[in-house]
Each structure stands twice: as structure tokens, then as C-alpha cells.
Image (tube, rainbow, N blue to C red):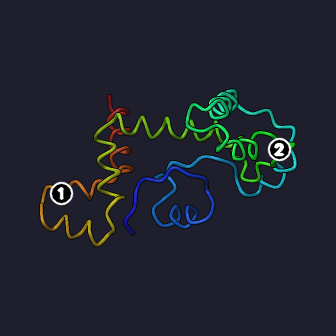
Amino acid sequence: MNGCLIIGTMDGANIEIAEEAGAENLFIFGFDASELQRLRKERKDYVADKRFIEIMKDIEGGMFGDKDYFKPLVDSISNMSVGNDWFLVANDFAGYLDAQAKVDAAYADQDEWVSWFFCFFFSPFERVSFALSSPAAAAFCCVSRPLRRARAAATTRQL
């Protein structure tokens, strides 16, 4: 499968992707499916993260475009007298920001970022084809992120 790095909740296709690629290779945030029914019942009394409240105010104020255009969307996830935030956007927002910070940290470490790209962006067939075209690429593709982390941990323990 070709694709991109995934930042998302553990539902739908992300469950299957995590089973095949390993959950450690996805940026996952949010609640377990077993918690959703309870969270939906409690949603009307939920106090959202202050960053969520700020962004809703920014959207309502027109920072990202026509505020009237976005009003139904904002109301559906932040005004419980109008909507019910069925997908628990407010509940997941802080977790999403934490996951995005992990993406930013991975990007800041260019070796880490490139290993994500080569080991998970290309399909297995493309990785083999690419690796066969270059011995250096073959060596690079064979060293997965978990293996590099294990080696780094072993080196740290020896110091």
C-alpha cells in the first residue's frame, strides 16, 4: 500500500493499518472505542481544553474565512444546545495536539523522518525494487526505526 504517515484515531482503517504496519508506526491519538458511548453521554457537560475553545472562537470570529459559512460546523461541535459533537472532536483535540507535537519532533530529527519515509511510504514491492537498484538503499531500508532505537538504547546503556 502506498500512502503517507498517519496521524489519526484508532478506528476504521487505522486499526487494520496498525495491525499490518505496527501501531508504533502511526501517530495515534484519541479514546478507545470502549469509551465512546460513555463519553458521548457525558459530552454535554464536558469542559473542553482551552486551546479548543480558543480555536473555536477564532473560527467564529472569521480568522479562517467567512464566519457565517463555518457557524454550523462550529455549533455542531462546540454548542451542545445545537449539536452533539458525535465524533468527540472537542474530547480528542488535546490528544491531537500532542500527536502533532510527536510528528513535529520526528520531523526535527531528519534521520528519523527519512526512515519513516523509506520504510513506510513505499509499498513492500517498491522497497524491494528500490533496494535492488542501490546497495546503500538496501542497507538503509533494512534498518527499521525500531531496530535503530534498540541500537541507540544499547549504546546508551554501555556508556
**Callout 1, which amino acid?**
Ala
Q: Callout 1: helix, strand or loop?
A: helix
159 vs 52, left or right, is left
111 vs 16, left or right, is left
Question: Can you identify the residue that label 2 sits on?
Answer: 43
Q: How far across and how far down the image is residue 118, in percent?
A: 29, 56
- Between marks 2 and 1 in the image, the one whose residue lies nearer the viewer: 2
User: Which of pointers 2 and 1 lies earlier in the amino acid sequence?
Assistant: 2
Identified at 75% across, 42% down, the residue is 75
23 or 98: which is nearer to us?
A: 98
**Callout 2, which amino acid?**
Arg
93 vs 144, left or right, is right
151 or 12: which is nearer to us?
A: 12
Q: How far across and how far down the image is residue 119, in percent?
A: 32, 57
Quarter of the image where one finds residue 156:
top left
Q: Quarter of the image containing the N terminus?
A: bottom left
Q: Are marks 2 and 1 in contact (CB under 8 Å)?
A: no
Q: Which disc number belongs to residue 137?
A: 1
Q: How far across and how far down the image is residue 124, in percent?
A: 32, 69
Q: How far across and how far down the image is residue 8, in percent?
A: 56, 52
Identified at 73% across, 48% down, the residue is 88
Q: Callout 2: helix, strand or loop?
A: helix
Is disc 2 surrounded by few (<14), some (14 to 19) or many (20+) residues within 10 Å?
some
Q: Which disc number belongs to residue 4?
A: none
Q: Quarter of the image containing the C terminus?
A: top left
102 or 72: which is nearer to us?
A: 72
Identified at 48% across, 59% down, the residue is 22
49 or 53: which is nearer to us?
A: 53
Q: Label 2, label 1: how many angstroms apart (C-alpha)? A: 50 Å
